[in-house]
Image (cartoon, rainbow, N blue to C red):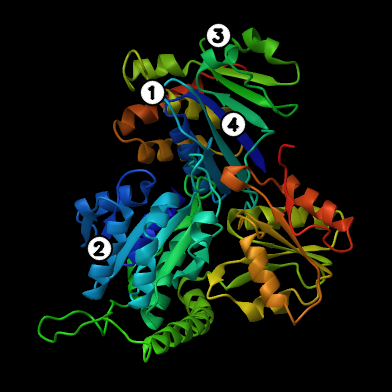
Amino acid sequence: MVEIRFHGRGGQGTVIASKILADAVSKEDKYVQAFPQFGVERRGAPVFAFIRIDDQPIYNRSKIIAPDHIIVVDPSLIDAIDVTEGLKKGAKILINSARKPKDFKYLGKKFQIFTVDATEIALKYKLGSKAAPIVNTAILGAVPRIFDFVQLESIVTSVREGVPVNPDDNAAAAREAYESVKGV
Amino acid sequence: MKKVIMGNHAISYGATLSRVQVIAAYPITPQTQVVELLSEIVADQKLKAEFIKVESEHSAMAACIGASSAGARAFTATSAQGLALMHELLHWAAGARLPIVMADINRAMAPPWTIWTDQNDSLSQRDTGWMQFYCQSNQEVLDSVIMAYKVAEKVLMPVMIVLDAFSLSHTYETVDVPDQALVDKYLPPLDYKYRLDVNDPHTYGGLTTPDWYMEFRIKMHEAMDQALVEIKKDAAEFEKVFGRRYDPVEPYMVDDADIVLVTSGTAASTARFAVDQMRKKGKKVGNLRMRLLRPFPFADVREHLKNAKKVVVIDRDISYGYHGIWAQEVKSALYGHSKVPVFNYIAGLGGRDIFPETIMNIVADVKKMKRPEQDLYWVEVKK
């Protein structure tokens, strides 16, 4: 069982990212559960999404309070909230950032840090607007690079099927992110 | 075809596959994405149905009653206060013997205002004459909509499909969406014998004197008894066609268990997970998941609890001044049949999470007692 928490802000597609990842994992015949923080969402406010992945049926339906890993879709959250709350020792942290993983070492010695500049990639492929790029598909491309529970091709297929517009650009963004992960 | 979908959309797909002909729904809070997707499916002409937007849930049920009386397969969905607003017409739908199916997303009742889950909304409709199926997975939600029409149209009583807000309604998981051809084979078009027909006019539900009223009620009660028989028969038929089985109750490791939990909804799923954890430590604990509230599966409950030394009912609901509603049902089923002590724990109201640890702590608490020292115990509450 792997449990992951996503951190983003309302409007960035964080919940959709968890759903697309669930879809990709499901394509590989694994069991999966993805859910948002249960409540009301506001644009710009911190939002959470969760995913559970297992080879066995998943019966636990309670909230995830001690995730194995986290994915930070919006790096500005790192200074705003404690993104590592409850995070298990040995966790991988994937951050959407142009900076190097060592710049985030202060998050804790017991974690492995990876970065990918999903914002830059989203802007390059004109995903969303200049002011509010949609970074979720780019960051998903980085996931198979650092975790072994899903393959890039499944991610690309699920991105294509899961986005409302521009499947080609979103798929290309995911592939580019896969190639540009720092810290691997 | 396998699809990753949320519980709300599992209902929409279930209704679409059931080829519902009339959907009447109030489109604003506390409505969910159930009818949002259905309205798109109807607008895209992927389902030949009339989608009626109404000004209240009371009107939604009234429109379903009208449609069903005319012989159409009718569907609606609601939550919490919306279900409460339908209350009067829930009695009417059942009394008129209309095979309407509705989904209720379990949300706690206000005030204080809330959008999170508990079961007080649906459980307080217990005596309206609706069957109630409580689900624990999105697959079960989709399948239950289809099964609901089958039994409703056989015994002419309405069915409510019940699922937890958020922990199912907004949770994405893999669902096998069956082929339309399979569903068509399993669920033929509705042929409602008593439909309103201008060429053969009848009056239904008119003033009935004490000479006859009771006989109508006996018929309803007998239809519910028959429903239980049909549901059990159908479990095998559904399994034959779709490869999945749903019985009125779902026992898990109860046969040799000293302590048997009785649970429903997603709490039942988490309880099963907790049972696995406790079994690994050698604790003889089992779980009995309740799928049916009405018709109540008395015989199954007695059978699966017969070896238990202690029964623990976990209620995500409360009957103020009494105790948990499921506990009341279980005690009533056991009375005169068993001397097993029944403990009642109230947990998770208004969406407070029920963790595996919550359930393990309840079991640890019960182990310390010979018999319940209180009528009910509140779980994880502020002092």
* Residue B64 found in image quarter: bottom left
Q: Which residue bears the numbered disc 4? A: A5
* Residue B331 found in image quarter: bottom right
Chain letter, disc 3 residue: A
For the residues bearing labels 3 and 4, Cβ distance under 8 angstroms: no
For the residues bearing labels 1 and 4, Cβ distance under 8 angstroms: no
Secondary structure beneath label 1: loop
Chain letter, disc 2 residue: B
For the residues bearing labels 1 and 3, Cβ distance under 8 angstroms: no
Tell me the amino acid under the disc marked 3.
Arg
Q: How many marks?
A: 4
Spatial CA distance of label 2 from label 4 is: 43 Å
Q: Please tell me if label 3 and label 4 are on a single chain.
A: yes
Spatial CA distance of label 1 from label 4 is: 19 Å
Tell me the amino acid under the disc marked 2.
Ala
Spatial CA distance of label 1 from label 3 is: 19 Å
Question: In terms of sequence position, does the residue under pointer 1 or pointer 4 come before the other?
Answer: 4
